[in-house]
Image: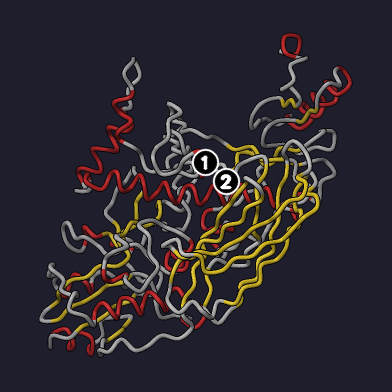
Amino acid sequence: MVRAYGNHPSFVMMTYGNEPGGKNMVNYLTEFVNYWKAKDKRRLYTTAAGWPVVEASDFNNTPDPRIQGWGAGLNSIINKEAPRSDYDWSGIISKWKQPTISHEIGQWCVYPNFKEIKKYDGILKAKNFEIFQEKLKENGMSKLADSFVMASGKLQVLCYKADIEAALRTPGFAGFQLLGLNDFPGQGTALVGVLDPFWEAKGYVTAAEYSKFCNSVVPLARLPKMNYTNNEELVVPLEIANFGNGPIQKATINWNIQAENGSKLFTGNFNSESIPLGNTIKLGTIKQPLKSINKAQRLILTVSVGSYENQWDIFVYPETLPETGKDILVTQTLSTEAIEALNNGKDVLLTLKKGAVKPEMGGDVKIGFSSIFWNTAWTRKQPPTTLGILCNPKHPALADFPAQYHSNWQWWDAITHSSAVKLSAVAPQIDPIIRVIDDWVTANPLGLVFECKVGKGKLIVSSIDLLSEQDNRPEAKQLLYSLKKYMAGSAFNPSKTIALSKIEGLYN
């Protein structure tokens, strides 16, 4: 290989291989590095992709700096910590003297796109997809297949954006190794690509959208959080990673914040004489009070430097909310009072505590905010085993909550304070207000919020805890308000009747 391609301009770094093993691996690979450093100085050498990190290497290639590590499960930064974009990996890489490249970042899954089956027109057939398609059909959700692809795809892109931007924000970082831009059909079915195995787009992200955060030049925002109340000030330091052809001269940095309908709410700019090559180059700090935002909504922050542009979604909620105008009993158990209310034709909102749902009713589902990492088969069901939420943002129950049909940062709080409910254990073919997308292997119908009639009354069941620590959870406070306001109106008229015993059997 070295004899044939040693002078190729792209052949500048060399590893032994990928993810090695063996009791003598460290000694062998250290000798490998030293041998090639002495023999051929045309390139840089390291032990292998992934590990081990040894002093002899010219650079490290390690999985330590990424937002989800193998085995991290729900303790990863994207699943355990409230959403933000102001962290980086400087604390991890500072212990090494060599430049560090992150190994196989990403690995975020998307739901199988069954339309790909017909693309296999040779000797290979997508038999795995046929099995998953049949499982979805068995569980009565065939009509949701395309929606699962699109919703999980939007979450997948959000996870990739978070992963890549964390690398670009890290001072002194040598680069990142993306596991794949397209799907890997083997090894348990690893649907980790924004492209399918045929290098074709799946419909939920374009190349232009992806290149906003994965490019030679990328504007960056260090957002201390993604969810705000309107009594706060937005303070966001802006940076740029410039690995383009050279310094950017006489740059104007424009920023604006617009509403979901496209109307611009706030704008500003900074000037820079010259943006050098490198990253963590400061552009200026946005300081914008949010007091004029009086309705819960998603806002889009856009930062542009010349032809390069990047965007982030943030969510703003009113600090104080009005009364909903109707007496609705909100409870965390079906107490005697709640049962009497239902029997008397009143409205009840049951919001269960996290962990209260029985294992056989969905409590054993390892729900998390992020997408599935690599897949559940190969990782022995490493959590999360879910692929985000799916809902109809135009459902009247969500009229006062800034919902999209897919997961975004506004759902992190709900997911991390919830248990999934196996809808099939409650009632056949129930259509929830908020659905969770299950792993394609099990394909269970899962929900977080659903409505029904019980006795003479009407009930909303939320397996999201909307009450605990509400003062520190504006998203929960807003979602509870939206559900209560819906229940207070004429649109609240559930079509499904469920026995009280079924609801009581949901939780411990």
| Contact flag, marks 1 and 2 (Cβ < 8 Å) | yes
The residue nearer to you, when weighing 144 against 279, is: 279
Residue 481 on image: x %, y %: 35, 80
Q: Quadrant of residue 440?
A: top left
- Quadrant containing the C terminus in the rendered view: bottom left
With respect to residue 366, does 418 lie above or below?
below
Q: Amino acid at mark 2?
A: Lys
Q: Which of the labelled discs sits on residue 208, or is there none?
A: 1
With respect to residue 338, does 381 lie above or below?
above
Q: Which of the labelled discs sits on residue 271, or is there none?
A: none
Residue 135 on image: x %, y %: 25, 41
Mark 2 surroundings: few (<14), some (14-19) or many (≥20) residues within 10 A: some
Q: Amino acid at mark 1?
A: Ala
Circle 2 SS class: loop
The residue nearer to you, when weighing 158 against 278, is: 278
Q: Which residue is pictured at 11% across the width and 79% down the height?
A: 455
Report the side of 102 relative to 99 (left or right): left
Name the residue that disc number 2 marks. 212
Q: Which residue is pictured at 29% across the width and 44% down the height?
A: 146
- Quadrant containing the N terminus in the rendered view: top right
With respect to residue 65, does 324 lie above or below?
below
Residue 205 on image: x %, y %: 45, 43
Query: In the image as oriented, which residue stretches furthest toward the top?
Result: 4
Residue 92 on image: x %, y %: 74, 52
